[in-house]
Image (cartoon, rainbow, N blue to C red):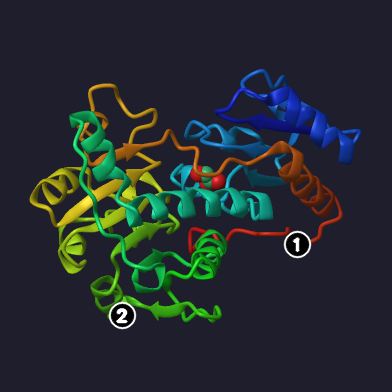
Amino acid sequence: MALMFKSNIDRPDWWRRELNKYVPDLEVRIWPDIGDPDEIEYALCWKMPHGELAKFRNLRAIYSLGAGVDHLLADPDFPRHLPFSRVVDPNLTGRMTEYVVQHVLNHHRFCHAYDAQQREHVWKEHFAPFATERKVGILGMGELGSGAARALQFLGFDVAGWSKSLKNIDGVTSFFGDDQLKAFLARTEILVCLLPLTPETENILNRDLFAKLPEGAGIINAGRGPHLVDEDLIPALDSGQLSAATLDVFRTEPLPADHPFWSHPKIRITPHVASISDPASVARLVAENIIRTKNGEPLLNAVDVNKGY
Ligand code: GLV
């Protein structure tokens, strides 16, 4: 019983150890040293080169190493008929919640402005309203978006979420569907993108959307790089339509050293670390799905390949 493992983070031995705790007879082979591809029954992966998964003729299931699955579904030869799952894990949600809270607070308390002032040795106060008067909007109210919304609501922020369908979360206003996007944006002073990347959400953070936010709004993108139209961001920051942007994800990762985002004073960059799948908790979930695959049972956190999440 062999599993092919491919990650972009250098911790394959840790994953092997954790998986073997729960499935001792599982042979974990690290891509690209996977031996005979016909012996591979399971694939646990992040960003496989296109065409690669289709080479495993005896594959029984595919497990994404992350919450997002766009990196796999972009492969035109992805075996869409196989059982396919993604990560839904309280620790992954918890880490994303930390990231969102950290950066919403930075925007709320003018950290970008103070960083710039410190560089110039300028002592000048900016008046932050009470959290109850600060309107935060979350684009995408799945597992990660709902977790962040709850924490922000607990801190007292005036939180709304926008998603495809109505969500009922105590104290969080729900906007849904294309018709309600404009109203959601009109009230959002700090916008957080946690959408899945699908053809419908690609390029959603663009000039038109920025123009619908109140002037001086801040944005945080912890979804995917292609949600943002890169060329539209800097003009929106330079004109003051946006006050600042925090970006964790990029069209090309690592972000090329000569990309203008690196040196823009109103952009804060983190290297796709908002939330990371932790072997200590995610391996248990993957193991459960391996056992389910063996028994012919439906997977936990199964992906709907037509929806793209
Ligand atoms: C990270 O980006 C993930 O999809 O979990």
Judge depth for marks 2 and 1 and give the one in front: 2
Residue positioned most to the left: 239
How busy is the neighbourhood of tag 2: few (under 14 within 10 Å), some, or many (20 plus)?
some
Rounded to the nearest angstrom, the CA distance separating label 2 from label 1 is 35 Å
Tell which circle, 2 or 1, labels the residue nearer the N-terminal end: 2
229 relative to 190 in the view: left or right:
left
Element type where label 1 sits in the image: loop
Element type where label 2 sits in the image: helix
Q: In this view of the protein, which residue sits in the foreground, 97 or 302?
A: 97
Does residue 35 lie above or below 155 as drawn? above
Q: Quadrant of residue 1?
A: top right
Task: Report x, y in % for residue 289.
Answer: 77, 51
Does residue 253 lie above or below 241 as drawn? above
- Residue 163 in sight: no
Numbered badge on residue 180: 2
5 relative to 181 in the view: left or right:
right
Task: Report x, y in % for residue 85.
Answer: 65, 53
- Residue 75 in sight: yes
Three-letter code for the amino acid on which mark 1 is drawn: Pro
Task: Report x, y in % for residue 183.
Answer: 26, 79
The residue at the point 44 percent across, 64 percent down is 140
The residue at the point 65 percent across, 34 percent down is 56
Three-letter code for the amino acid on which mark 2 is drawn: Gln
Numbered badge on residue 298: 1
Q: Quadrant of residue 257?
A: top left
